[in-house]
Amino acid sequence: MVDVLQETREFHARILSSFWSIYQDEDSEKFKGIKISKDLVEIGGDAIKTNITTLGPLVLPFSEQLLFFSTLVWKILFGNGAKSHPTKPYIPDYKLAFEHFCVHAASKTVLDELQRNLKLSDKNLEASRAALHRFGNTSSSSIWYELAYLEAKERVKKGDRVWQLAFGSGFKCNSVVWKSLRKIKRPSRNPWLDCLDRYPQGDFQA
């Protein structure tokens, strides 16, 4: 059993460049496919950043919020003049807010960037990389394969918090935070049961 603690949604369809960044279309021969804008990475990154920034104050400990706010104020007041000591934005430690992470497994590059920017460990992204390795890019449904992975590994204990982060066309980015009300035992039906002993798989190279 789980309880929903928080949910945040970011949807930028009102911005034309965002709306047309990725969409389904037909070519000259009437074959359907996906058109991707050259600005997709920047547009997607902005939506993800906004969503995470909105979620932060709702889930992070006060100490992390205080550090983030103080460095932001310092940058506003003194950042421009401190050329010899440039101020970097403080990245809150989201590992203090969550025990488990289920990040949209769009590609290895996306996971690498999110891991680097959020300073997550290999263990934090193990479920995401395992889902990408076994199932490929299954779009936003990947976060449920990742949750199933954690359940099959019996890693979710009572009181643990799980962050699911997914994104898609529009451009949209959604977060949901779950809290486990009991230890989750390995289910009898799970997509990982026939290969669980093969994961984690080194660097997850196919």
Image (cartoon, grey):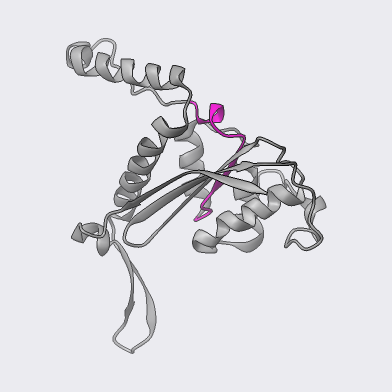
Q: Position of residue 47 (x, y in %)?
A: 33, 47
Instruction: Give the magenta part as a residue range.
Output: 93-106
* Residue 99 on the magenta segment: yes
Q: Is residue 120 left or right of residue 92?
A: right
Q: Is residue 69 above or below residue 127?
A: above
Q: Nearer the viewer, residue 98 or 103?
A: 98
Quadrant holding the C terminus: bottom right
Q: Is residue 197 above or below residue 98?
A: below
Q: Is residue 41 left or right of residue 177?
A: left
In the picture as drawn, the residue positioned furthest to the bottom comes out as: 29
Looking at the image, which residue is at 36% across and 38% down?
Answer: 54
Looking at the image, which residue is at 33% across and 41% down?
Answer: 50
Residue 183 picture quarter: top right
Looking at the image, which residue is at 49% across and 56% down?
Answer: 106
Looking at the image, which residue is at 33% across and 89% down?
Answer: 29
Q: Is residue 120 left or right of residue 158?
A: left
* Residue 157 on the magenta segment: no
Q: Position of residue 104 (x, y in %)?
A: 51, 52
Q: Position of residue 19 (x, y in %)?
A: 26, 62
